[in-house]
Image (spheres, rainbow, N blue to C red):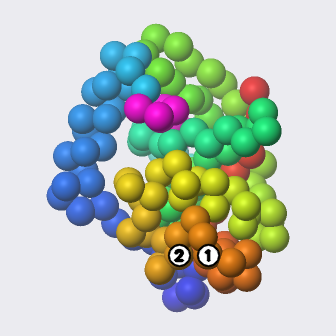
Amino acid sequence: MTTTDARQLRPGRADRIGNRLLNGLLRLGVSVLGSRELAVRGRRSGEWRTTPVNLLTVDGERYLVAPRGHVQWVRNLRAAGGGELRLGRRTETFTATELTDDAKPELLRTYLRRWAWEVGRFFENVDADSSDERLREIAPGMPVFRIHS
């Protein structure tokens, strides 16, 4: 198992409960700080799989960051090349491009500034004030996708 594979962090009981509550709000059309329901077709089953995500907007560009690492939605998104972002009855179809590790440090810093209270524990002793070098060290375990409508 590589370091990148090992960075897949499974949600605990509190995370699963929180995700269910957040999904309920998202389906009602209530976004929490830009959150959305991500829907991606399963790479094996072809069935829609959903999970709540934090949609990061920087300089007019939108990104999805996977703070738990190379989890199932990341693998499915890579295979499918796109999916849907849902909020209430609104559905936006998108394609996605995965970023290189060198392109991630400033985006990870911005992501942490906004959502460290929620996902900071997944960032391996890194915070928004960490150096670019330290952010590059963890970049291979933090997939980031640019979203294109």
Can residue 31 be spotted in the picture? yes
Residue 82 relative to residue 50: left or right: right
The outermost residue toward the top is 89
Can residue 71 be spotted in the picture? no
Q: Amino acid at mark 1?
A: Ser
Residue ID for mark 2:
126
User: Whole-percent x and y of residue 10?
Assistant: 34, 66
The outermost residue toward the front is 129
Are dots 1 and 2 in contact, CB under 8 Å? Answer: yes
The residue lying at 47 percent from left, 21 percent from top is 87
The residue lying at 67 percent from left, 44 percent from top is 63
Magenta: main secondary structure equals: strand
Residue 102 relative to residue 142: left or right: right
Tag 1: Cα neighbours inside 10 Å, few (<14), some, or many (≥20)?
few
Q: Amino acid at mark 2?
A: Val
Tag 2: Cα neighbours inside 10 Å, few (<14), some, or many (≥20)?
some
Residue 52 relative to residue 14: left or right: right
Rendered-image quadrant of the C terminus: top right
117 above or below 23? below
Residue range in magenta is 32-41
The residue lying at 79 percent from left, 39 percent from top is 59
Q: Secondary structure at mark 2?
A: loop
Residue ID for mark 1:
130
Q: Which mark is residue 106?
A: none
For the residue pair 63 and 134, the one nearer the viewer reads as 134
